[in-house]
Image: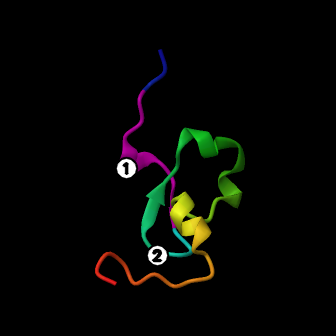
Amino acid sequence: MAKMRKKSDLPQKICATCGLPFVWRKKWAKDWDAVRYCSDKCRGAKGEKQNGPGK
C-alpha cells in the first residue's frame, strides 16, 4: 500500500479569481501546471473580481 502524504506536504497554488490558496488533487495530476482556478465556480467567474465571502 502506498504511503499517505499529509495535506500540508502537497503543492499549493493561489486561485486566479478569488485569491485563496488551494492544494493539489489527484484528478489534476496530469495537468497541474495548467490549473489556475480552485473550483468550477471560480473558472466560470474568471472575468469578474470576487470580494470574498462577505462581498
Left or right of residue 53: residue 14: right
Place of residue 2 in the rendered image (x, y in percent of width and height, measured from the top left): 49, 21
Rate crowding at label 2 as few (under 14), some (14 to 19) or many (20 or more) other CA atoms within 10 Å: some
Determine the secondary structure under disc 1. helix
Image point (28%, 81%), residue name:
54
Pick whichever, 39 or 21, lies toward us.
39
Q: How is the image coloured?
A: rainbow
Residue position for label 2 = 19
Left or right of residue 22: residue 29: right
Determine the secondary structure under disc 2. loop
Residue position for label 1 = 8
Query: Residue 43: which quarter of the image?
Result: bottom right
| Mark 1 or mark 2, earlier in chain | 1
Q: Amino acid at mark 1?
A: Ser
Q: Which residues are magenta?
A: 4-14
Residues under numbered marks 1 and 2 in contact, where contact means CB atoms less than 8 Å apart: no
Q: Find the distance from the CA under tag 1 to the CA under tag 2.
A: 18 Å
Image point (42%, 70%), residue name:
20
Tell me the mark number nearer the camera, choosing from 1 and 2.
2
Place of residue 10 in the rendered image (x, y in percent of width and height, measured from the top left): 47, 48
Place of residue 4 in the rendered image (x, y in percent of width and height, measured from the top left): 41, 29
Q: Is residue 37 above or below residue 16?
A: above
Image point (52%, 59%), residue name:
39
Pick whichever, 13 or 2, lies toward us.
13
